[in-house]
Image: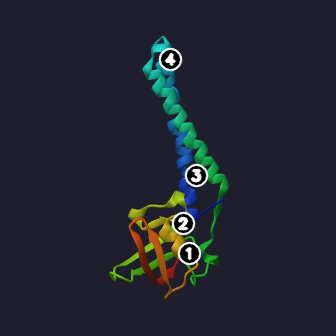
Amino acid sequence: MAYMSEEGYQKLVAELRYLESVERPKVVAAIAEARDKGDLSENAEYDAAKEAQGLLEMKINQLKATIGDAKIIDTSKLKADTVQILSRVELKNVKTGMKMAYTIVSESEANLKQGKISVTTPIAQGLLGKKVGDVAEITIPQGKISLEITGISF
């Protein structure tokens, strides 16, 4: 089951529609064009188009599976007393004093540039269930870090 926001769910549905209505016909047309060029056994263009079709269909199937397993979370029913999925968490690195903020989202919604980290990352896993004032000791590839939770919101 993939927990996600309504916004993330709608983005996945839009991407699926685009792939099925725009990209799939392009690939079918490319295959037909390559097929018209003659002998398929030595036609690299045909092979490339068939491979592109396979990759596209795989992506479409993955999106369908993710959408089918999606559980949309209503943030109005969530409490900001502990860190959970869709929480915006304000943190302070205990050692350096550096402040940061992340929103914990599903894997499909993660985007570090927007400050959205996947619930499956070590940082998110270390923060889940913590409260404001708690210090989370988190093991990351560079070692251990201590992050103090200074705020939780939605």
Is residue 153 left or right of 67 when viewed as pictured?
left
Q: What element does badge 3 sit on?
A: helix
Q: Looking at numbered disc 3 in the image, what kind of residue is underneath it?
A: Val
Residue with the mark numbered 1: 128
Sequence-earlier tag: 2 or 3: 3
Instruction: Specify the quadrant of the image occupied by residue 2.
Output: bottom right
Query: Where is residue 24 drawn, in percent x and y?
Result: 54, 35
Label 3 environment density (alpha carbons within 10 Å; few <14, some 14–19, many ≥20)? some
**Which coloring applies here?**
rainbow
Q: Looking at numbered disc 2 in the image, what kind of residue is underneath it?
A: Val
Q: Looking at numbered disc 4 in the image, what kind of residue is underneath it?
A: Arg
How many angstroms separate mark 4 from mark 1 (CA)? 54 Å
Residue with the mark numbered 3: 13
Question: Closer to us: mark 2 or mark 3?
Answer: 2
How many angstroms separate mark 2 from mark 3 (CA)? 21 Å
Sequence-earlier tag: 4 or 1: 4
In depth, the one of 32 and 152 nearer the eye is: 152
How many angstroms separate mark 3 from mark 4 (CA)? 32 Å
Label 1 environment density (alpha carbons within 10 Å; few <14, some 14–19, many ≥20)? some
Sequence-earlier tag: 4 or 2: 4
Q: Which mark is residue 35?
A: 4
Instruction: Specify the quadrant of the image occupied by residue 150.
Output: bottom left
Q: Quadrant of the N terminus?
A: bottom right
Q: What element does badge 2 sit on?
A: loop
